[in-house]
Image: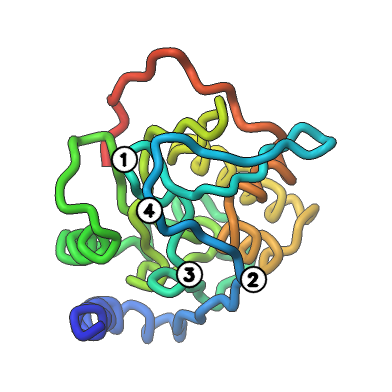
Amino acid sequence: MVNRLIGCAIALLSLGAGLLVHGRQPTTIAIQTRQTATIPTTAIDGNFDTQGIFHPVITKDRLGYPYLSDAKLSPGEVLPVGLDQICIHGYSKTVRHTTGEMKHQVYEEYGVQSHQRGEMEVDHLVNLSLGGADTLANLWAQPADVNLGGYSAGFKEKDALELVLLRKVCDRSLDLQTAQRAIATDWIRAYGKYIGNLPEYPTHRGSSWAD
């Protein structure tokens, strides 16, 4: 907890100038409560509903890391921005300031002592392009290669969801706050709601995705 407080202070100092210039202070998202398994497992259990969407019971990947964020460590934070800002191409580059120290702290708090390049990444829970803040409360360690009952649920799939949500928000078919809350609460369920079934897990997947 002390490390997180120190890290937050450092992060806020590095971000403060940019945020204050634009009058933007991050706001923590009050996400819905969800049950998270604490025992690592090599298999992911769950059930398919009548629409064919998989609802997991175990929330760990094959290495024992969660493929959903820890709500206590990463509740999600957003900036007070609107469609006139986030729907402009290149917006996310103006608010991206993640440092190596921040990434190191996130890996440490999620129990990732070491990993091969492409196995994990420090991800923005609410993506920057959707108004997410570049703060520790909005960062988590996401595994790349997750076999969720025969379906892929890694960061490539979350990236696809982020694009769909942004497109829906910018064409005004989805409210921005609704999209932010959906991806912060449980991105797997949000994928099922806004896209459909996750893609089938391939028999062989390389590790070319870099963090």
Tell me which residue sits at (31%, 31%) in the image.
Answer: 209
Distance in Å between CA atoms under marks 4 and 1: 18 Å
Label located before the other in sequence (4 or 3): 3
Identity of the amino acid at label 1? Leu
Residue pointed to by mark 1? 63
Label located before the other in sequence (1 or 3): 1
- The quadrant in which the C terminus is found is top left
Nearer the observer: mark 4 or 1; the answer is 1
Label located before the other in sequence (4 or 1): 1
Residue pointed to by mark 3? 71
Task: Between residue 74 and residue 42, name the one nearer to us.
Answer: 42
Task: Between residue 168 and residue 17, name the one nearer to us.
Answer: 168
Label located before the other in sequence (2 or 4): 2
Distance in Å between CA atoms under marks 1 and 3: 20 Å
Residue 111 relative to residue 150: left or right = left
Residue pointed to by mark 4? 123
Distance in Å between CA atoms under marks 3 and 2: 9 Å
Number of numbered callouts drawn:
4
Hey, which quadrant is residue 61 in on the image? Answer: top left
Helix, strand or loop at mark 1: loop
Label located before the other in sequence (3 or 2): 2
Distance in Å between CA atoms under marks 2 and 1: 26 Å
Tell me which residue sits at (65%, 60%) in the image.
Answer: 182
The reply to whether the C-beta atoms of the residues labelled 2 and 4 are less than 8 Å apart is no
User: Residue 22, relative to residue 96: is it above or below?
Assistant: below
